Amino acid sequence: MTETPKALSGGFPARNETDWRALAEKALRGADFDATLGRETADRLMRGPAFFTRPDGAHAVDTRPKDEYLPWGMRQAIVEPDPQSANEAALADLMGGVSELQLNLDPEGRHGLKANEIDTLDAALKGIDLSLAPIHLETLRGQGHHADLLLTLFARRRLDGEGLRGGLGINPIGRSARQGVALSPDCFDKAKALLELSQAAFPQLTIFRADGALAFEAGATEAQELAVMAGSVAAYMRLMGDAGLDANTAAPLIELRLAADTDIHVSIAKLRAARQVFARIVSSFGADGPALRANIQAVTAARMLSAKDPWTNLIRNACAGFAAASGGADAITIRPLTDALGRPSGFARRVARNLHTLLAEESHIGKVTDPAAGSYLHETLARNLAEKAWEIFQEIEARGGLAAAFADGSLQTAIAASRSAAMTRIAEGEAIILGVTKYPDPDPRAVQTRGSWGEEDWPESGLAPVNLAAAFEGEK
């Protein structure tokens, strides 16, 4: 060889956004880059394609070591109306691998257990060691009454209160918004009384639920969902401060609830953004250290589920569950494939809980502390979502807080506009629901349920849930 070999000690040549964009435009052969390839979220945030770099200050959002065998709380909902069937469903779920129970309560028995007295609640939880299986309440009507029943049941069973875990799910602002009723001033007084009772006897229980998912199910964008969550956090931090709790004690008593859907990347970014927003709010109240870490329950979205062809919901739930796990949710609830039709059969419940096992043990997501860390797409999108949500949250605060923003109807109006825009995008083909608006099964197979949910007459002034998929299947 007569030629001097090239030096191989150097790295690859550095690239930047200008280099990448030039190559992309060359491949397009004159077509407009943004018009051809540009995509936005529902909040008009650019999601790609782009040359993503690490945002300033980006870091792993959850450095907590994960349990190898239980990387997240596998929390499934009990929706049966009578205590016997609720107990059977709860025991089956726990024997099938579920680690937590979400007990849906409804004074009318339409959407959950009709447990208006302690004996009914006791019967529904018969044979369940409540010190091992945390109970989280989910109730729209009678939140304070049902929370008081659960605390009384704990005392009746003489459970060790110091280590008992679970949640009361108190969210009076969300209740009034969904029902379209004014928030009674004594609701906060009742919440303070429950707070004091729970802290005295069961200090590990979460008390309040900052529920952004209720807005998402009504048609909100991701940023609006995060803003509602943020408004709830601020309201309940103030309430607990008024009750005499310091910020480091108060912050862990709030659980965040967010929806995860088939948009995997946005769902991952949303959960990461929620942690940033939560930490910023509670730190403003004086919290620091471990108290800055949000406790998040992710629920697979109801608004994405098909009523006409429920079998396709297996794929939707798998995508949403994957997003929730990858986004670092502390607890995940996967809706049964028949959720858009009615109460689930034993088969539908089994498939839902088995998805947890598939994600944790076959996909191995649970073995990674923060699966999305280092993905500049998710980190950039999370930062942009957090900033957009913060803008909406500031508007909410300027109106006097979340309760005031719901009371004057401004927030419902904004969410209704987002819902209408989503419907338009679907109707015009800009957004596609696979299996519904594109490639529907002309002869879908029926699936068994244990009865329909029954009609719910939501007031126009309320934050009524909407099923975007079913709306384009001719279903109500």
Image (cartoon, grey):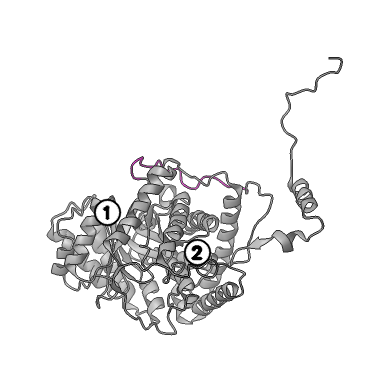
User: Which quarter of the rendered picture does the C terminus lie within?
Assistant: bottom left
* Callout 2: SS: helix
Q: Residues within 10 Å of mark 2 (few under 14, many from 20)?
A: many
The kind of residue tagged 2 is Leu
| Mark-to-mark CA distance, 2 and 1 | 26 Å
Magenta stretch, residue numbers: 56-70
Near-viewer residue (224 or 237): 224
Q: Residue furthest front?
A: 443
Is 346 left or right of 331, judged from the image as shown? left
Image quadrant in which you'd find residue 335 = bottom left
Q: Is residue 452 above or below residue 369?
A: below
User: Is 123 colored magenta in this rendering?
Assistant: no
Is 62 left or right of 241, judged from the image as shown? right
Q: Residues within 10 Å of mark 1 (few under 14, many from 20)?
A: some
Q: Measured from the top left, where is residue 294 in percent x and y?
A: 43, 54
Magenta region, main secondary structure: loop
Q: Is residue 73 above or below residue 426?
A: above
Q: Measured from the top left, where is residue 379 in percent x and y?
A: 58, 50
* Callout 1: SS: loop
Tell me what residue is drawn at x 56 percent, y 67 percent: 432
Q: Could one spot residue 238 in this view of the protein? A: no
The kind of residue tagged 1 is Arg
Q: Which residue is mark 1?
A: 165
Q: Residue furthest right?
A: 2
Tell me what residue is drawn at x 54 percent, y 70 percent: 437
Q: Could one spot residue 175 in this view of the protein? A: yes
Q: Which mark is residue 226?
A: 2
Q: Measured from the top left, where is residue 255 in percent x and y?
A: 38, 59
Image quadrant in which you'd find residue 188 = bottom left
Q: Is residue 440 above or below residue 325?
A: below
